[in-house]
Amino acid sequence: MSGELVEDSVVIKNQKESSQLYNKGNYGYPLSGGYLELDLVEALYLVESKRLNVTKNKEVMSFEELFNYASTTLEEFSTKYLVYRDIRSKGFIVKIESGTFDLSVFPRGKTTSNSRPMYVIRAVSERNALDITTFVNDASEIENRGKELIYGVIDEEDDVTYYKMSHRDPKGNVCPEKKCKKTYGHLIVDRVFVFNPTDLQILRRRGFYGKVVENVLHLSLIEACYLIKKGEISVYLSNTKKITSFSSLKKFGRKTQDEFDIRLKAYSDARARGLVVKTGFKYGTHFRAYEESPECCHAKYLIHVVDTKNKTMWPEISRAVRISGGVKKEFLFCMIGDSVKYLEFKWVKL
């Protein structure tokens, strides 16, 4: 069968061929007169699979010629085509989206006439840097449409990896007890140490804060700042023996640790949700979080904190998601801006 190149689409005028492509493969969009209009992505896929000849000025175009034409006509064409090609080869019906997103994917074995899209795809290259706010806006738009959002990421070898993204509202069940007495700690170098056994037990009972080593409770600066602000602890400076303020300890934290402010904001938000929050260093991220006592359950979440003003790269996301999948935890981006929002990234196999 054959079609004619018309600007940014291919038109098939033979009614029998049009009907066959549309009814059996759900390719293209019917036009009046029995014609069928194909997107360049669809047309190129059919040319590659040797099911279609495309003519320009009555001359048949090779795959290379059509690919080069489409790449110069449409932005990011090659990325969209590679994702489309991969999904079509898996037996899904795929249609081109207009606007922000690239593709709509229908359930395998269904058609456009008897089903609705199950996924909306955004095709990107691993070299793309994206504003964090893009993820938030994309997820909100697709969830409002009742669909699932997937990013199809093309690597340097033109392989496709898929990541499902969605808003999350993580919650835990650890609610601190009502304060009974203030506890005391000592700032030594970049840790706060609680030596009094009674104070140690109070802080552990209230929220499983810190780590006990040889009957001494070790608190991170993040934990200590949070507890000072909550009025749960007073911290003595080791050199002056004076009690430090929240603002002074926070200032010290900024000097000694990167991204201290946004990590403290994320930690405070997660704690307010009833989660027990510990370092995520061994997993290559900022925090791990438990829904219950760490003594009786495994961490459910890995939380990576990002400023919405920053950009992120796909290799960074890939590393984090792969690690979380290997240890059977959910990977969340904690977006710090005017508010705190959580997005889950999950590797999926279509």
Image (cartoon, rainbow, N blue to C red):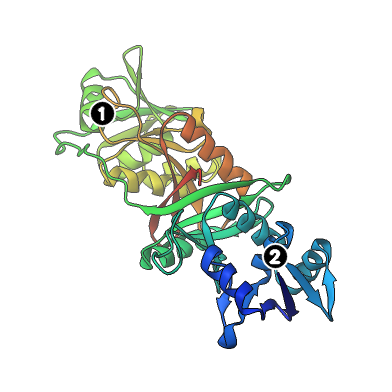
Which residue lies at the image location 27% right of the left edge and 46% below the top edge? 273
* Between marks 1 and 2 in the image, the one whose residue lies nearer the viewer: 2
Nearest the viewer among 39 and 297 is: 39
x, y (%) of residue 348? 49, 44
- Give the side of residue 315 with respect to residue 346, left or right: right
Point out the tag, 1 or 2, that comes first from the N-terminus.
2
Residue drawn where x is 58% and y is 69% of the image: 20
**Residue at position x 59%, y 68% in the image:** 21
Q: Which residue corresponds to mark 1?
A: 293
Is disc 2 placed on a helix, strand or loop? helix
Residue extending farthest bottom: 33
Q: Nearer the viewer, residue 123 or 226?
A: 123
Q: Residues within 10 Å of mark 1 (few under 14, many from 20)?
A: some
Compared to 250, does 72 lie above or below?
below
Q: Is residue 225 left or right of residue 25?
A: left
Tell me the residue that label 2 is attached to: 77
Q: Where 256 sits versus 195, above or below?
A: below
Q: Toward the viewer: 281 or 26?
A: 26
- Report the quarter where the N terminus lies: bottom right
Q: Are marks 1 and 2 in contact (CB under 8 Å)?
A: no
Q: Which residue sits furthest top?
A: 214
Q: Residue 327, image x and y in percent?
A: 45, 29
Task: Identify the amino acid type marked 2.
Answer: Phe
Reply above or below: 268 against 1.
above
Q: CA distance from mark 1 to mark 2?
A: 50 Å
Tell me how many marks there are.
2
Q: How busy is the neighbourhood of tag 2: few (under 14 within 10 Å), some, or many (20 plus)?
A: some
Q: Amino acid at mark 1?
A: Ser
The location of residue 194, given as percent across then percent down, is 32, 24
Is residue 302 among what the camera can see? yes
Give x and y (percent) for residue 162.
54, 48
Q: Is residue 312 visible?
A: no
